[in-house]
Structures are given as C-alpha cells and as structure tokens.
Amino acid sequence: MNRTLDVFPTLDELIQQALTLILNRIHTAMEERGHCTLALAGGSTPKPLYEAIATQVLPWEKLHIFWGDERYVPADHPDSNQRMARLAWLDQVPIPESNIHPMPTTSGDPNQDAAAHNTHLREFFHTPAPEVPSLDLILLGMGADGHTASLFPHTPALQAGDRLVTVGDKDGEPRLTFTPALINQARCVMFLVAGDNKQAALAQILAPIADAQAYPARLIQPAGELMWLLDAAAGHALK
Ligand code: 6PG
C-alpha cells in the first residue's frame, strides 16, 4: 500500500489539490484502459470539488460514475448523494446517462437493492463472484465517529466478506454501501476530511493500533494508493 497524508491550510486548498490529483488519475485511467471508473463520496465535504470538476473539459463519454454509498431515499430527496452530485456536477456536463450508475433505492427492500447493485457491478466489470472488481478511484469522506461510506461502527456491514455492496445502518436508518472488500480493491482511494470535529476519530484511525469495529475507516487498507487529504481543522495535530 502506498499511503500519503497531506494537510492543507483551508478547505479550498484541499479541494484544489484533490481536483488536480483526480484529473491526473482520470487521464491516466483513460490512457491505460480507455475509460475511468470513479466512485463518489456523499456528505457535504465533496460538493465544492464536484462543482470544480464540472468546470473541466473532459472526454465525458469515457468516465463512469458510481457512488460509494447512498441514503435509502428517492433520487430527488434532499438527502440523496446522487441528487447532490447531479446538481453540483453531472447535470452540468455532457456525460451520457448510461455512464452514471446510481445505487438503486426504490424497491422498498434495501437488501434487494444492494443485491441488484452488486449484480450490476459484477456485470459492468465482468467480475463473477468471488472476484472483486477494481475501480480506478474511490472518493471517501469520514464521519466524526470514524465511519466511512456507510460503514458505521459496530454494524453488520463491516462483516460483508466478498460482497461488493451491502446494507449499512445509521442509527436504524438503512443505507447502501460499498463493502471494505470492494473499496480495498480500488487502484486509488482518496479520503477528503475537513473540520475540527473529525480530529479525534482521525487520531484513532491513523494510530498504529485501534479497534476497526469502532473506527471503520481503519478497514480501508487498499493494495493500491491510499491518499488522505485533510484541512488544518481536521489534521493540524497530525502534521
Ligand atoms: C454520506 C457519506 C458519509 C460522509 C461522511 C462525512 O452518505 O453521508 O458518504 O460517509 O462522507 O459522513 O460527511 P461530511 O463530508 O458531510 O462531513
């Protein structure tokens, strides 16, 4: 694993560096494999990043968009991660709708929708079980409790084995989420973490020893690149 950690004075500087790194990896993937597969983080931190990517000129037909997790709400719900990314970015660029692969949240049964997306990913990447596909880049956030994607502390999603997608649980609220196995197979995983409320969890996640069940972001140990981009509020104690 190739791990880097960078602390930026402001969120804006973090976003600008993330943009540069992401564009670099998008172009490399397209050159090497003809397309790029990118999974988006939800929450609030990445919104300005998505707005910045929307200003770029890219071969959008070669970019495939996934989400690392999704709230179990309709796509037009204010809490939808898909909705946030579409409004901030995807609706502003000529990316083919067939290149956008949202997590389904409409059957009424989160387990059924997780299984359907698991199948969709296996078909898209041509990776039958028990193979795990490699996305080119997965963006992740981190909560103040040390969760990432919708892998929340002490929940069954942390034991998902070689499944690609499972059902997360945030205080009884269902979510769909990539599993640690799928995230760890990515060529590059990039955490974007901002805010002083993340400091305590970060210290546990980056410590030599801590309980990964209590701090699920510790489970993210990809064979490829692992990049932590922090603002000073989150990471000043780590410099
Ligand atoms: C979600 C996210 C979640 C998020 C963290 C950080 O669906 O909310 O995927 O994992 O990345 O909770 O959220 P903020 O960026 O809003 O702090």
Image: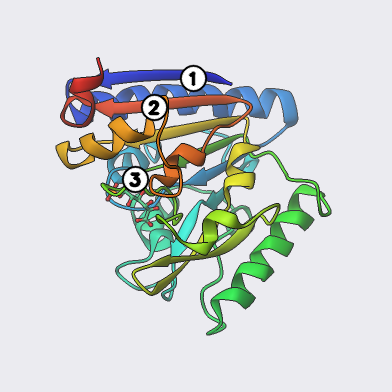
In the displayed structure image, the side of residue 78 where residue 91 appears, left or right: right
Residue occupying the far top of the picture: 239
Give the quadrant of the N terminus.
Answer: top right
Nearer to us in this view, 80 or 3: 3
**Which residue, given by chain and number where applicable, does mark 1 sit on?**
3
Whether tag 2 and tag 1 are in contact, CB under 8 A, the answer is yes
- Estimate how packed mark 2 is, as few (under 14), some (14 to 19) or many (20 or more) residues with alpha carbons within 10 Å: some
Q: Position of residue 124 (x, y in %)?
A: 75, 53
Q: Quadrant of residue 209?
A: top left
Query: In the rendered image, which residue does mark 2 sit on?
Result: 228
Labels 2 and 3 touching (C-beta < 8 A): no
| Horizontal and vertical percent position of residue 213 | 45, 49
Q: Which image quarter holds the C terminus? A: top left
Nearest to N terminus: mark 3 or mark 1: 1
Question: Residue type at mark 1?
Answer: Arg
215 or 195: which is nearer to us?
215
Q: Residues within 10 Å of mark 1 (few under 14, many from 20)?
A: some
Q: Is residue 47 left or right of residue 123?
A: left
